[in-house]
Image (cartoon, rainbow, N blue to C red):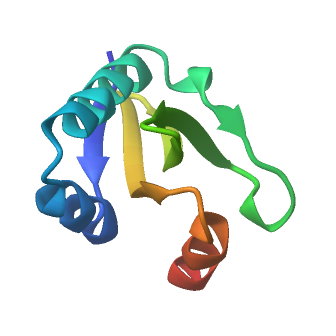
Amino acid sequence: MYQLIFLPPAEKYFKKLKDKNLKQKYKNALEEIQKDPYIGEEKSGDLSGMYGYDIYYNKTNYEIAYRIYNLTDGGKVIVIMAGTRENFWDTLKRYIK
């Protein structure tokens, strides 16, 4: 099982979440990613090496962006950002620059 590490934007987003059902959806998604991080869709172009996992809840698309690191002492998944799909990847590009 991979270790999850949250960067500040993801941590802040999860902390602010009030909707219990959406929080549970994210929790389930993160557990799935922790078991098999390659379940997400690998990005290409200027976001290559990054993975995205979609969550659909209450007629809205949500996204989790993360990177996978396979190290000798075990794998790590760095959760970079989470949020609604709208402008998500543009915001992420600005953050990683």
Q: Is residue 82 above or below residue 54?
A: below
Work out whether residue 28 or residue 75 is closer to the camera in this orientation and state it.
28
Find residue 84 and report its horizontal and vertical position in percent: 48, 57
Find residue 22 and report its horizontal and vertical position in percent: 27, 38
For this view, does 52 lie left or right of residue 13?
A: right
Work out whether residue 59 or residue 1 is closer to the camera in this orientation and state it.
59
Residue occupying image coordinates x 31% and y 35%: 26
Q: Is residue 88 above or below residue 14?
A: below
Work out whether residue 80 or residue 13 is closer to the camera in this orientation and state it.
13
Quadrant of the snapshot with the N terminus: top left
Question: How many marks on residues?
Answer: 0
For this view, does 73 lie left or right of residue 52?
A: left
Q: Quadrant of residue 15?
A: bottom left
Q: Is residue 40 above or below residue 92?
A: above
Of all residues shown, which one is farthest toward the front? 59
For this view, does 19 lie left or right of residue 72?
A: left
Quadrant of the snapshot with the C terminus: bottom right
Residue occupying image coordinates x 52% and y 40%: 59
Q: Quadrant of residue 27?
A: top left
Residue occupying image coordinates x 60% and y 43%: 52
Residue occupying image coordinates x 48% and y 16%: 36
Find residue 20 and report its horizontal and vertical position in percent: 13, 37
Q: Is residue 2 visible?
A: yes
Q: Is residue 73 visible?
A: no
Of all residues shown, which one is farthest toward the right? 45
For this view, does 18 lie left or right of residue 83?
A: left
